[in-house]
Image (spheres, rainbow, N blue to C red):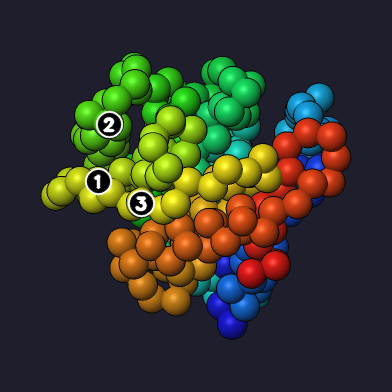
Amino acid sequence: MKNVLTIAGSDSSGGAGIQGDIKTIASYGHHALTAITAITAQNTQRIHHIQPIDVGKQLAVMDEDFEISAIKIGMLYTVQNIQTVIRWLDERKCPIVLDPLVCASTGRLLIQKEAITELNKLFRKVSLITPNLFEAEKLTGIRIKKEIDMEMSCKKLYQMYQTPVLLKGGHFTWENQAIDYFYDGNEIITFKEERLKSRCTHGTGCCLSSAIACELASGKTIEMAITGAKKTVTKAIRNGYFVGQGEGVVHTLGI
């Protein structure tokens, strides 16, 4: 059993964020360590409020007791939290997966506007970044409408940060397929999975990034880790369920 740390916000609906990460990490048979950056008041229909939390002391105690095999980073929200995490990561040697969480699929910002520039500095310190289409557009300025736009955006993100990129295509209207683009400075690799017609997709991004962290914790290469994590997410969506009147949640513990 490995210790996998998730640094992220709390989702009061229980579908994504820290709660989603814990379930995903547990499904791999690993132990989830947590550092909470914000508390959200949300349900299956919308985010009502975000209350930031200083993550510094939570991270400070980790090295006193735990050997951490991999780290997943999600919503950091504030400049202070981003700066704290950047300093703390200076001594890390384990794989680090960053899900930027700049904005939700609804367009709601999941980071304070003044913190976006600071977030760019963090991108250079991690092993992999996993932006969605909306985040990629905001970071690169490239409008993504076709497959070639995915490739261009992926390459530009790598050029900007010199960090491997997995650009998630789940929100794109492909024919019967969900296609993600990966670029590590050498070649573009696509990861294709069956597109599922499901309304149970809340927590998909958190599930993917924490699953990649778990795969990396087991010693796999990034490409192998992405392949395994994609299969985990597909099963989690297929087994998803509804808890409220809005979007359903992925079911990682049911796989």
Residue 85 lies left or right of residue 45; in this view the side is: left
Q: How many marks?
A: 3
Q: Determine which residue is flagged by label 1.
A: 183
Question: How far across and down, in percent of the image, does residue 192 sit?
Answer: 35, 51
Q: Determine which residue is flagged by label 2.
A: 147
User: What is the three-letter code of the residue carrying label 2?
Assistant: Glu
Residue sitting nearer the eye, 56 or 103: 103
Residue 28 lies left or right of residue 248; in this view the side is: left
Which quadrant, please, contains the N terminus?
A: bottom right
- Label 1, secondary structure: give it: strand
Q: Residue at x 55, y 35 (%)?
A: 101
Q: Residue at x 44, y 76 (%)?
A: 218
Question: How far across and down, in percent of the image, does residue 137 sit?
Answer: 39, 22
Q: Determine which residue is flagged by label 3.
A: 192
User: What is the three-letter code of the residue carrying label 3?
Assistant: Lys
Which quadrant, please, contains the C terminus?
A: bottom right
Q: Residue at x 31, y 43 (%)?
A: 181
Cα separation, mark 2 vs mark 1, equals: 14 Å
